Image (tube, rainbow, N blue to C red):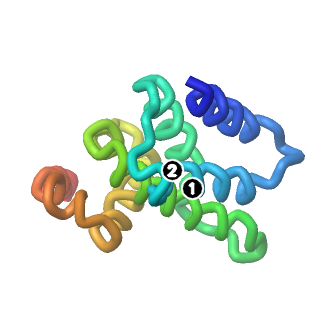
Amino acid sequence: ETVNKFVLSLLSLYRKPAINYYCISQCISYLLSPSPLNPKLTLNDNVINSINNVLFNLVVLEPDYDQPHTVKNHFEVLRCFDHMTGQFPDQTVENLLHYCKNNQEKERMKAVIILTHLTTSSQVFIENFASKFIAILKVMI
């Protein structure tokens, strides 16, 4: 329960513009990464959904290379999705696949960026969800 509250507190920091998003994303990535002491993180479903939604909104379609911290944060967010897919594959990937079916092109493109990243970084994604992603891509084209 303490971890759930802590994660929600970290997510709420994204609402404060004075705080560097990259640092928050690094903390979340560290928490989500499996370790020998905590190989499987236990989070409530609403916390998992909150993480997925907040991180999804931080993915950028066109990185601004004049602001390197935004590019770093974008890649750290993708790393968080790697960890989320490893820890909570069903909720995370199904949510992203749902975004691919969204009417708003911006939402679809963000989901495609994340899912494309997962095809190169996540064995769990390849084994369990790649065929669904390919089917959705065929419909999108």
Q: Quadrant of the N terminus?
A: top right
Residue 2 percent coordinates (x, y): 62, 27
* Amino acid marked by disc 2: Leu
Visible residue check, residue 124: yes
Question: Viewed as shown, does residue 109 lie left or right of 72?
Answer: left
Residue 118 percent coordinates (x, y): 33, 63
Residue 72 percent coordinates (x, y): 66, 69
Q: What is the CA distance from the residue labelled 2 to the residue labelled 1?
A: 5 Å
Picture quadrant where residue 54 is located: top right
Q: Which residue is mark 2?
A: 32
**Secondary element at image label 2:** helix
Q: Quadrant of the C terminus?
A: bottom left
Question: Viewed as shown, does residue 128 lie left or right of 96?
Answer: left
Visible residue check, residue 139: no
**Secondary element at image label 1:** helix
Q: Residues within 10 Å of mark 1 (few under 14, many from 20)?
A: many
Q: Are marks 2 and 1 in contact (CB under 8 Å)?
A: yes
* Amino acid marked by disc 1: Ser
57, 39: nearer the viewer: 39
The residue shown at (50%, 36%) is 53
Q: Which residue is mark 1?
A: 29
